[in-house]
Amino acid sequence: MRLKPLMIMWITAVAATWVSAGQKPQELACASCHETAVDSFAHNVHARVAAFETPSGVTGCASCHGNVLEHQESGDPALVHRFGKDREADSRVCLQCHGRGSKVDFAGSLHAQEASCSSCHKVHGRSKATDTCASCHADVKSQLLAPSHHPIREGGMTCASCHDVHSSRPAMLAVEGRVNDLCVTCHAEKEGPFIFQHDPVEEDCMICHQPHGSTADNLLVANEPFLCMQCHEFHFHVGQKARSEAPTYTVGGKVYRNVLGVHGYRQAFSTKCTQCHTQIHGSDYPSQGISSRGKSLTR
């Protein structure tokens, strides 16, 4: 067997530390049978710390796989820990290093109930985080393919930008508290507080928005005006019908030119409510409509 240059560099670095400590460089023996695993390990962040003693008091392959010496002598695979066989045992091995000083209770998280560390992480290699999540969350992957989506496909963010996959918090959000606390970390201009508030916005962004992707504009759960109609009735505009024989129509005592024909009102005001109510997330300026008492969120 011929060792590859990168593998030789890693083994040499690890072996130098072991020899200085009076230990036998066992990775040379491991590579004789597990060339692919040892070679891919050289590309992993674990390779940079493998030469240091772990809390269990051992280094290198043995720090994760256990009784390497006896396995090498007998060839019995049962003498070493093999990832993917026991979910709880896999996580215990990883948490001997990654559990130290951590504020995250992975043992109480939803992922810990259904998967182990090795279900998502490749100890000897690398994987793309989004692809790893999509292997289980196919429904979310399909939403990310929608026309309106967060820039995950483009590489602008990952699932971990919003989710802490090791967390025991509800929905495993990257922040504690409400969903809104997470959204405003990027969309600070929507946070307020505003003098004139929009109640659904204050309660939960996901009342109106689908965060993973939507066929509606701006990640909305439905296009306008149908989304707004879930809470609001149509304004008087839509019920109006202009006089076909007159070139003008009157709204609130003010005369306007009728440039859209007899159904002008319905065409103009049955499309997007935000054509007029532009400050839908909240405003500090009173609207000019008297009937709304300033709360129309128009400016």
Image (tube, rainbow, N blue to C red):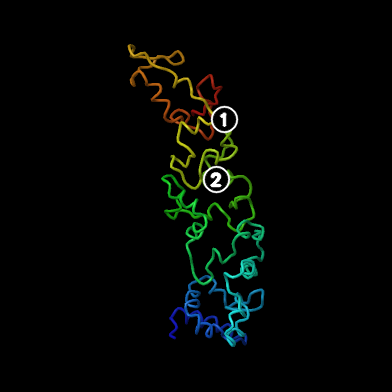
Using the numbered discs, state the Cα–Cα distance from disc 1 to disc 2 in whole angstroms: 20 Å
**Crowding at mark 1 (Cα within 10 Å: few <14, some 14-19, many 20+):** many
* Circle count: 2
Q: Secondary structure at mark 2?
A: helix
Residue carrying label 1: 196
Q: Amino acid at mark 2?
A: Cys
Q: Position of residue 66 (x, y in %)?
A: 62, 78
Q: Position of residue 5 (x, y in %)?
A: 43, 81
Q: Which mark is residue 82?
A: none
**Crowding at mark 2 (Cα within 10 Å: few <14, some 14-19, many 20+):** some
* Residue 22 shown left or right of residue 233 in the figure: right
Q: Residue at x 50, y 21 (%)?
A: 289
Q: Position of residue 58 (x, y in %)?
A: 63, 79
Q: Which tag, 1 or 2, sits closer to the chain's start?
A: 2
Quarter location, residue 115 = bottom right
> On screen, 175 above or below 208?
below
Q: Residue at x 49, y 67 (%)?
A: 126
Q: 158 and 71: which one is in front?
A: 71
Q: Amino acid at mark 1?
A: Phe
Q: Residue at x 40, y 17 (%)?
A: 241
Outermost residue, top direction?
Answer: 245
> On screen, 63 above or below 171?
below
Residue carrying label 2: 183
